[in-house]
Image (cartoon, rainbow, N blue to C red):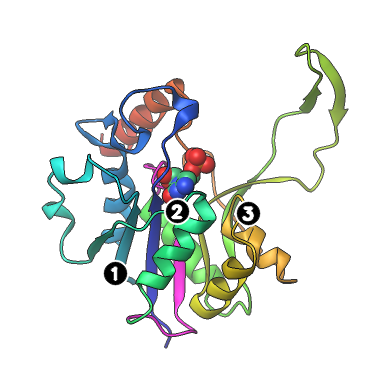
Amino acid sequence: MPSHYAIVPAAGSGTRFGSEVPKQYLDLAGRPLIHHSLAALCACERIKRVWVVLSPGDEWWGSFDWTSLGAKLHAVFCGGATRGESVANGLAAAASVLADDDWVMVHDAARPCLSQDMLATLCDELADDPVGGILAVPVADTLKRADAQQRVAATEPRDGLWQAQTPQMFRYGVLRKALAANSGVSDEAGAIEAAGLKPRLVGADASNLKVTFPADLRLAELILEGRNR
Ligand code: C5P
């Protein structure tokens, strides 16, 4: 039976958030944002080990206590210039532990509301899948294309469109090869697609949001509060 592992790229600077503190270390319900994302993965029984990929110059990681996350968690300071490079470097750092047919989940540091139910659904739905896949939600809103003056230039059809989330789960060997050939992609599925394969879309929900702008942080807090009530 193939095992499950997780890689969390966390070497970004979060410039869109516009804060002095890197986004992944912002306080969310009394803990750094990334602590929640890592805790969800570490709490999942099926996942054997979790690598968090940090920037070589990360000065924040060491100032927090991660011991409550247990022995599954391994920090590696080998982040790259792009998300794809950070993931590829993390996969290389994990090479002595993983076999080519093991499953690797790649999860954004900035998605702190990942639930155990969604993790279980992802693993169950992809268990016999030849390619692997991603959590995603069908686009619900009408989509507008903007012009340079921020006026509507066009209304785009949304039929068949999904928003990609993470975790994105693929076989270690396939993902490593795909990212080596295409590290400029904005998610792992993009590299798999460029390799000519079709990742499966596993239905998730909007609670697994990515914290990108300041208002997202409050939303994430409300979701976590609601879950703990
Ligand atoms: O910027 P964005 O929110 O799309 O980043 C998604 C994830 O990729 C974040 O967890 C971020 O820290 C990570 N990342 C990385 N290395 C980079 C850029 C982004 O690990 N060079």
Residue 209: tell me if it is visible: no
Question: How far is disc 1 from disc 2 in space, using C-alphas?
Answer: 21 Å
Instruction: Give the main secondary structure, helix, strand or loop, of the magenta stretch.
Output: loop
Question: How far is disc 1 from disc 3 in space, using C-alphas?
Answer: 25 Å
- What amino acid is labelled 3 in the image? Val
Among the two numbered marks 1 and 3 on one chain, the one whose residue lies closer to the N terminus: 1
Foreground residue, 50 or 59?
59
Q: Position of residue 18 (x, y in %)?
A: 43, 22
Q: Are marks 2 and 3 in contact (CB under 8 Å)?
A: no
Image: 224 above or below 120? above
In the rendered image, which residue does mark 1 sit on? 49
Q: Nearer the viewer, mark 2 or mark 3?
A: 2
Q: Is mark 2 within 8 Å of ligand 1?
A: yes
- What amino acid is labelled 2 in the image? Gly
Q: Quadrant of the C terminus?
A: top left
Question: How far is disc 2 from disc 3 in space, using C-alphas?
Answer: 13 Å
Q: Is residue 13 magenta?
A: no
Label drawn at residue 185: 3
- What amino acid is labelled 1 in the image? Arg
Q: Which residues are magenta?
A: 97-114
Among the two numbered marks 1 and 2 on one chain, the one whose residue lies closer to the N terminus: 1
Residue in view at x 49 percent, y 70 percent:
124
Q: Position of residue 135 (x, y in %)?
A: 55, 55
Q: Position of residue 160 (x, y in %)?
A: 79, 48
